[in-house]
Amino acid sequence: MTAPVRGVAVAPTTSEPVLPGFEHMRRFWDPTHGCMTVKVLPGEYYVSTQEEMISTVLGSCVSACVRDAERRIGGMNHFMLPEPMSGERNDWSSAVGRAARYGSDAMEQLINAVLKAGGRREALSVKIFGGGRVLAQMTDVGQRNIAFVKRYLETEHLPIVAEDVGDIYPRQLQFFPNSGRVRVRQLRSQRDAELAANEQRYLKRLANDPIKGEVELF
């Protein structure tokens, strides 16, 4: 455990290693929350069995937080499109490029990684977030993502225990897999809305945005 110094948690001199397969993920000490933090970008997922935080920023993308509460194992993904659509050509699709991983892959990989880490399928529950209509002039990709993930989870018989999806705002998401807590902050300023026009650029510029005004909803 990290010992507080004058009321402030300090970074541990050592940290527990990540699960096999996640060595490439960037982890850093978050003094605000007093834990290690991992940022998940589009097309990525991460699973943990320890006390750390997984964070991301969502526009029209969706993240699923999958967790085995009994064994305190959980993970989060971040996908930008549910599945390829024949003939679809617009600026949003071009911006995604080859970096995107479709929702069908993202869900399967995340669930399998949780099970590989020791989770039991019958004990899994899911929280879903994102899918905002942040680009009104384009196809409502967010609603497609929401419809996909709900359909996928229904087919797989995995219960959704909480959700914050839709609307028109980007979101900052923080998931604590050990406890199951989730914090969501809606990004409502004009600056945030402009950044959402390109999700890759948006994520880079908000990567180190201070946590403020966050509300613990779930």
Image (cartoon, rainbow, N blue to C red):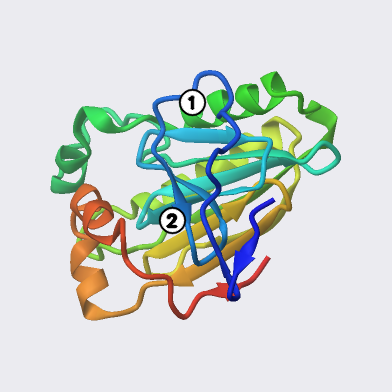
Residue at point 22%, 27% (across, down): 98
Residue at point 59%, 25% (across, down): 19
* Contact, mark 1 vs mark 2 (Cβ under 8 Å): no
Give the distance between the C-alpha atoms of the residues marked 1 and 2, in whole angstroms: 26 Å
Q: Label 2 belongs to which residue?
A: 131
Q: Secondary structure at mark 2?
A: loop
Can you give x and y, in whole percent of width and height, for residue 215 in the image? 57, 76
Can you give x and y, in whole percent of width and height, for residue 89 in the image? 16, 38
Q: Is residue 121 above or below residue 123?
A: above
**Displayed quadrant of residue 170:** bottom left
Horizontal side of 49 relative to 106 (left or right) equals right
Query: Of residues 75 and 12, which is closer to you in this image?
Result: 12
Indicate the quadrant containing the C terminus: top left, top right, bottom left or bottom right: bottom right
Horizontal side of 67 relative to 83 (left or right) equals right
Type of residue at label 2?
Answer: Gly
Q: Is residue 68 above or below residue 156?
A: below
Horizontal side of 29 relative to 65 (left or right) equals left
Crowding around mark 2 (Cα neighbors within 10 Å: few <14, some 14 to 19, many 20+) is many
Q: Label 1 belongs to which residue?
A: 22
Type of residue at label 1?
Answer: Phe
- Which is nearer the N-term, disc 1 or disc 2? 1
**Displayed quadrant of residue 113:** top right
Query: Of residues 6 and 30, which is closer to you in this image?
Result: 6
Q: Secondary structure at mark 1?
A: loop
